[in-house]
Amino acid sequence: MVFNEQQFLEIAQLLNQSKKIAITTHRNPDGDAIGSTMALSAFLRDYCSAEICVVLPDPCPYYLNFLTKQHNFADFKTDSAKSTNWLQSCDLLFCLDYNHPARTGPLEELVRTCAGRVKSIMLDHHPQPEEFVTYMGSNTKASSTCELVYAFCTKLGMDDIPPAEIAACIYTGIMTDTGSFRFSVTTPNTHRIAGNLLQSGIRHWEIHEQLFNQNALEKLRLWGIALKDRLEWLDDAKVAYIALSADDLKSNNYKEGDLEGLVNYALSISGARMGVLFSERDDKIRISFRSVGDYSANRFARTFFEGGGHENAAGGVYNGSLENAVKHLIKSLNEFSA
């Protein structure tokens, strides 16, 4: 586990003393972000007497709403007042599934200020974490933050076979971050945890159905445009990219989460070393990178696009036009040594 025995004793004492706990995660939350925050929220509801709120930078993607129904949560984009209030008034802060406050986007300054004011706890599996918290629970070998939340909660007394509500959240995060258990981060321990989660009685096939087979018609049309008209191949670099404009998104009624997984289709081209997805949102260009083998998406994103993440899965941003973002990609690929 990521904390030693003394740290666990201190954390347990903090939990029992706290009256108001804020749980935060990164912007554009995915299955691991929502799964880990909601699982921890559900566990803490019974473990301690504190009020608990999950504070998100952006709205929860619609396909993950089934995990949030019994929780107190807010997102800064649609309810900045509630989000701000919790981060300014809590007496304990959790930072889940991010290694740097910048990954919380519009919450960055609130998170930094809060972490400087109260005790704070990180649970995360991304490389190069910034030491901005009191207790830094970082383990890059974990398949997901949900795997770390499972270990954290069982250490604090949760049964190996957790309640179904918690199990569904943790299963969702592990399954999505491991690519349905096919990525190299999947370990025997990952499967052991998954086996325990299934024993809780969750209907895992219904979780898969909710995540992958509830597509809006507009989303599929957007993906059709992306793959037919916006997919480009850079043969010298062996990199494929998709560039979607704000008009592309607007004309297809884009919702948060509609682009999740699209970048993998760029990477799936035979011989591709990296796939890149550009999307023009919120007056900036958001970028997803996926790579294979020792071609480091993380290092590329950190070096050229103010980003970072895992070795083969990272994100970044570009402040400028979509056209110039693509030009910057091509120029950067010529400079990059994998």
Image (cartoon, grey):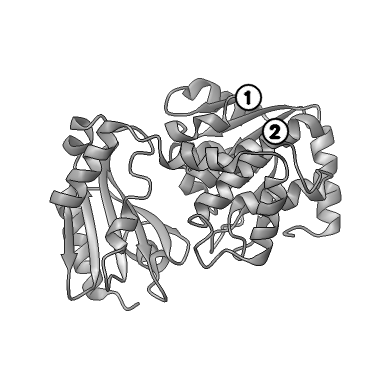
Q: Is residue 123 left or right of residue 218?
A: right
Task: Tell me the quarter of the image containing the C terminus.
Answer: bottom left
Q: Please state the horizontal and vertical placement of residue 279, each as a whole percent of the image.
A: 26, 45
The mark that comes first in sequence, 2 or 1, is: 2
Give me the residue at 62% from left, 36% from top. 38
Pick whichever, 112 or 6, lies toward us.
6
Q: Which residue is mark 1?
A: 70
Residue at 27% in and 59% down:
266
Q: Give whichever of 4, 46 is nearer the camera.
A: 46
Position of 99 with respect to 316 (left or right) is right
Residue 164, image quadrant:
top right
Q: CA distance from mark 2 to mark 1?
A: 8 Å
Query: Contact, CB < 8 Å: mark 2 with mark 1?
Result: yes
Res 42 label: 2
Q: Quadrant of the N terminus?
A: bottom right
Residue 216 percent across, percent down from the top left: 32, 32
245 relative to 272, above or below: above
**Is disc 1 surrounded by few (<14), some (14 to 19) or many (20+) residues within 10 Å?**
few
Of 235 and 167, which appears nearest the observer? Answer: 167
Q: Nearer the viewer, residue 116 or 326?
A: 326
